[in-house]
Amino acid sequence: MARIPVPDRGQPIDVSYISQIVTAINELSSKVSSATFRYASVDTPIGKEILSVSDLKIVAGEKQVYSAVTSFTPETSESFSYSFGSDEYKYPPVVTVTPVIFDGTAVNQEVSVLITSVTRSSVSGVVNFNTSGSVALKLNILAIGVPS
C-alpha cells in the first residue's frame, strides 16, 4: 500500500491529496474484507459471540517458573499467576497455558499445568511435576477474548 505524505503546516489540501487518502482507505478496506474466515467464535457467559478477528483482544505472554535449572521431586508443584495487563477483558477469556522446558533433564517430560482460575484480568494455576529431575521451565500463555 502506498504511504501518504503528511502535509506541512499551512499547506493547502487539494483534490489530489484527498484522492490519495481515499485510495489508501479503499485499499485498506479491501484487505480487511468481510470474508467468513476473518471472524472468530468466542464462548462467553452470555453465549457465543461472533466477532471479527481484528475486534478480539489477544494476549500472548510468557511466565518464568524456574529461570535456572532447579531440582524437584515427584508430587512437587509450583503456583503461578499471570496478569493480562491493565486493559481487562469484558468476560474471562479463553486461556491456554503450555509448559516449555528450556534446560534440564529428559525425565522432565512429565510436567502438567492445571489452570485454577481465569478472571477478566489474570490467570492462575499450578505446575505439577510427576517425576524427579532438574529443569528450567517457563509457561507460554495465550488468552483470547472480548475486549472491555
Image (cartoon, grey):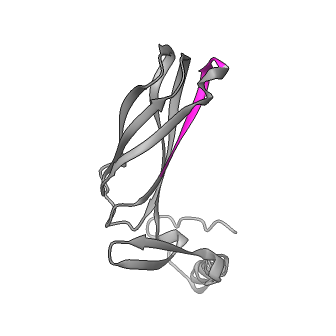
Q: In the image, which residues are magenta? A: 96-105
In the image shown, does 41 or 109 lie closer to the viewer? 109
Left or right of 46? Residue 138 is: right
**Quadrant location of the C terminus?**
bottom left
Q: Residue 143's spot in the image, x, y percent?
A: 46, 55
Left or right of 47? Residue 56 is: right
Q: Residue 133's spot in the image, x, y percent?
A: 56, 16
Which image quadrant is residue 18 in?
Answer: bottom right
Q: Residue 56's spot in the image, x, y percent?
A: 46, 67
Determine if residue 23 is in view: no
Residue at the image point whose x is 38% and y is 79% from the top: 47
Q: Residue furthest right?
A: 1
Residue at the image point whose x is 43% and y is 78% from the top: 48
In the image shown, does 58 or 117 lie closer to the viewer? 117
Give the answer, above or below, for where 105 lies relative to 81: above
Q: Is residue 2 magenta?
A: no
Which image quadrant is residue 125 in?
Answer: top left
**Quadrant location of the N terminus?**
bottom right
Determine if residue 62 is in view: yes
Q: Residue 130's spot in the image, x, y percent?
A: 51, 28
In the image shown, does 110 or 16 lie closer to the viewer? 110
Q: Is residue 101 magenta?
A: yes
Number of residue marks? 0
Give the answer, above or below, for where 113 lies relative to 85: above
In the image shown, does 52 or 72 lie closer to the viewer? 72
Residue at the image point whose x is 67% and y is 76% from the top: 31
Our reading of the magenta stretch's main secondary structure is strand
